[in-house]
Image (tube, coloured by chain):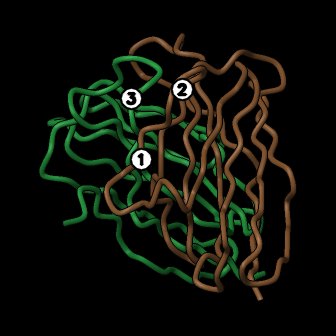
């Protein structure tokens, strides 16, 4: 059973379009993270959301944490080819982050392709 | 942000040989390092948790004799794939934490190491 469900799995859009992708779970999280990974590289942290209902913006990327802290969305405005990559949501299970040994669990990821 | 570096970034080896991958935290002391495996277009699967000076903790289904992990210092952890087989071909990624990331936690990831076993 996948704890973090991400959708859609694959998305191919034209440059300039807007998009929203999702990370859903039946579990409540103390925080949730979004990463972007480019081919052949490690994931890079984009944002951490902590408070239910929280909205964080990173240039053209808008992240929202659900009110119940069970889900999150990522909205990209006017997508550009440079946004192409694998978007991963991740969370610390079993009570959240409690220290260095806390294990981060990832969703399956959303592969985004932005065509010029 | 903190820097984690992996070496080598790519390695090709013959079946039956062993390969060592290094993970270094360059500007902080990593009390804990994690090793992940990633198949093409798939998510990261945690293999093991590596603590400095103690034995690694392996996730269910990961063979500890196959994937040897050594965390000999606060800045270096190594993953050795022993007697490699083609099915071990994958992208291996490490991450590190210094344990001082508040309630949200932040892990820093290496660039990954692509292993191809012929």
Q: Is residue A98 left or right of residue B5?
A: left
**In this view of the protein, which residue sits in the foreground, B82 or B11?**
B82
A82 is higher (above) or lower (below) than B69: below
**Residues tagged 3 and 1 counted as in contact (Cβ below 8 A):** no
What is the spatial separation of the Cα atoms under label 2 and label 1, in whole angstroms?
A: 11 Å
The residue shown at (69%, 55%) is: B80
Please give the name of the residue rendered at 34% of the width and 36% of the height, measured from the top-left corner: A92
| Tag 1 subunit | B
Q: Position of residue B15 (x, y in %)?
A: 73, 84
Q: Colour of chain A?
A: green
Q: Quadrant of residue A87?
A: bottom right
Most foreground residue, B85 or B101: B85
- Are marks 2 and 1 in one subunit? yes
Depth check: give the residue in front, B97 or B16.
B16
Q: Quadrant of residue B20?
A: bottom right
Q: Which residue is mark 2?
A: B51
Q: Chain of mark 2?
A: B
* Nearer to me, B55 or B111: B55
Q: Secondary structure at mark 3?
A: loop
Q: Position of residue B97 (x, y in %)?
A: 58, 25
Q: Which residue is mark 3?
A: A102
Left or right: B110, with B55 as reference point = right
Query: Which residue has dot 1 on it?
Result: B58
Which of the chains bears the disc numbered 3? Answer: A
């Amino acid at each position: 059973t996948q704890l973090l469900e991400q959708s859609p799995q694959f998305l191919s859009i034209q440059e300039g379009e807007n998009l929203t992708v999702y990370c859903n779970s039946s579990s409540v999280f103390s925080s949730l993270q979004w990463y972007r990974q480019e081919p052949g590289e490690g994931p890079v942290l984009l944002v951490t959301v902590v408070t239910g209902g929280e909205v964080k913006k990173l240039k053209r990327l808008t992240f929202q944490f659900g009110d119940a802290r069970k889900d999150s969305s990522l909205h990209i405005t006017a997508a550009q080819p440079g946004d192409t990559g694998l978007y991963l949501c991740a969370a610390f299970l079993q009570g959240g982050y409690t220290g260095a040994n806390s294990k981060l669990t990832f969703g399956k990821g959303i592969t985004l392709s932005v065509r010029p | 942000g903190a820097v984690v570096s992996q070496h080598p970034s790519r390695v090709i080896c013959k079946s039956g040989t062993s390969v060592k991958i290094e993970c270094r935290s360059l500007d902080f002391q990593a009390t804990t390092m994690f090793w992940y495996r990633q198949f093409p277009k798939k998510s990261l699967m945690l293999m093991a948790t590596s603590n400095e000076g103690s034995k690694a903790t392996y996730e269910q289904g990961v063979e500890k004799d196959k994937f040897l992990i050594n965390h000999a210092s606060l800045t270096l952890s190594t993953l050795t794939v022993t007697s490699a087989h083609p099915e071990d071909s994958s992208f291996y990624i490490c991450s590190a934490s210094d344990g001082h990331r508040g309630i949200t936690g932040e892990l820093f990831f290496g660039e990954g190491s692509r292993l191809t076993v012929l």
